[in-house]
Image (cartoon, helix red, strand yellow):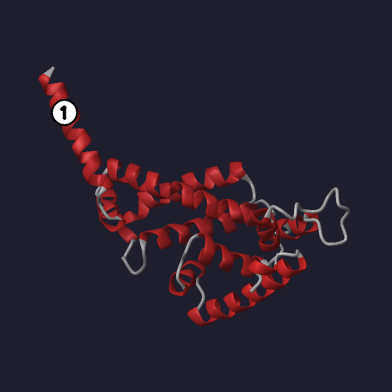
Amino acid sequence: MQNVVAINAEASQSIIAAQATSDDMLLESIADGNRTAMHILYCRHNVRVYRFILRIVRDATTAEDLVSQVFLDVWRTARQFQGRSQVSTWLLSIARFKALTAMRQRRFEDIDQEDVRQIPDEADTPETSLDRSDTSAILRACVAKLSPAHREIINLVYYHEKSVEEVGAIIGIPQSTVKTRMFYARKQLADLLRGAGVDRFAA
């Protein structure tokens, strides 16, 4: 009985130590086949990765499947991580590739345009228009009206709090291009918000 207690205590200490470990150190352990480290990394980042993928594929089941694929790739390729970016940036890079590949394979190229057509505009009747008191719903609707490239920039910068450098690494474009897209994305979003009657967010 004492042996069992000792083993459980040792396992608990191992988990606590792993939770306090940096993402980079976790990846090193994962590369050595440490399943506890893999579990900790998954618990730490799976929600963020899921939300990021969901914004691209717009389908919960597909997003859940892709999250599993992302972390399976992490388990298989942890040794390939070179530390040139944050682990979270690397994870979102893998997630983006998986999501875009899934969309191409399943012929979802027109999903963005379809979503835009389903969003009520100023000409809609009061019954189908957005609730003006719900500014978060208006903001989401306006972001959805952005082009895919601009929406992706807004998503990474504001929802995932990524820097210009990190966004460039995730998407695979120069930082100058990120800045340009960000400028036009913010300008377009401000115009949409003003059109929706939310001037305080459009400044």
- Residue 90 seen in render: yes
Q: Position of residue 67 (x, y in %)?
A: 49, 47
| Quadrant holding the C terminus | bottom right
In this view, 58 is above or below 156: above
**Helix, strand or loop at mark 1:** helix
- Image point (58%, 75%), residue name: 182
Q: Is residue 2 left or right of residue 26?
A: left
Q: Is residue 9 left or right of residue 35?
A: left
Q: Amino acid at mark 1?
A: Ile
Locate the N terminus and report the quarter of the image it occupies: top left
Q: Is residue 33 visible?
A: no
Q: Which residue is mark 1?
A: 7
From the top left corner, tell me how far across and down residue 75 is, in percent. Answer: 36, 48
Please tell me whether residue 149 is drawn above or below residue 45 in the rendered image: below
| Residue nearest the observer in this picture, 190 or 181 | 190
Name the foreground residue: 121 vs 112: 121
Residue at figure coordinates x 42%, y 47% from the top left: 72
Q: Residue at x 46, y 50 (%)?
A: 70
Residue 132, position in %: x, y?
74, 55
Q: Residues within 10 Å of mark 1 (few under 14, many from 20)?
A: few
